[in-house]
Amino acid sequence: KNISAPQDDYGIQVGAFSDIKTAERATESLEKKGIENLVIHTGTSANNTTVFRVIVGPFEQKADAQKASEMLAGMETAGLVIDMNNLR
């Protein structure tokens, strides 16, 4: 898992946490489900606090991310397709 995400593609945000340890535990839990290509992006929330986003990806095409999001939903993992260019 990476601590910063490449910002030129799409991803599926599956969690956002205020501390890194919780984000790391979330990635470990997802890895146990067989979910790969996880990144933790450190950024800023709307209220200017640090946020650690757990993201599956990256995917070059939005359609690929949407398809993977549907697959994750089948694994009882909800996610939101995001444009990684818009991360802050």
Image (cartoon, helix red, strand yellow):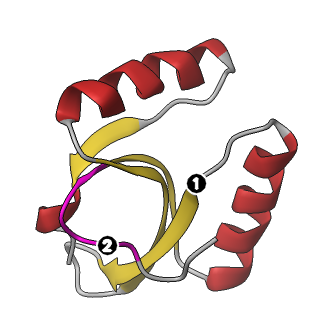
Quadrant the C terminus occupies: bottom left
Q: Farthest right residue?
A: 32
Q: On the picture, is 24 further left or further right than 37?
A: right
Q: Give the residue pinned by disc 2.
A: 6
Q: Position of residue 36 (x, y in %)?
A: 66, 48
Q: Give the residue pinned by disc 1.
A: 37
Q: Please tell me whether residue 28 belongs to the stretch shown in magenta.
A: no
Q: Is residue 1 above or below residue 44?
A: above
Q: Secondary structure at mark 2?
A: loop
Quadrant the N terminus occupies: bottom right
Nearest to N terminus: mark 1 or mark 2: 2
Q: Callout 1 environment at 10 Å: few (<14), some (14 to 19), or many (20+)?
A: some
The dominant secondary structure in magenta is: loop
Q: Position of residue 56 (x, y in %)?
A: 50, 49
Q: Callout 2 environment at 10 Å: few (<14), some (14 to 19), or many (20+)?
A: some
- Amino acid type, callout 1: Asn
Q: Secondary structure at mark 1?
A: loop
Task: State the image quarter where residue 2 is shown.
Answer: bottom right
Q: Is residue 40 above or below residue 61?
A: below
Residue at the (31%, 72%) spot, across then down: 6
Task: State the image quarter where residue 17 is shown.
Answer: bottom right
Which span of residues is magenta-colored? 5-10
Residue at the (22%, 55%) spot, across then down: 9
Q: Farthest left residue?
A: 86
- Amino acid type, callout 2: Pro
Between residue 37 and residue 52, name the one nearer to us.
37
Residue at the (20%, 37%) spot, across then down: 61
Instruction: Measure the C-alpha gap from mark 1 to mark 2.
Output: 12 Å
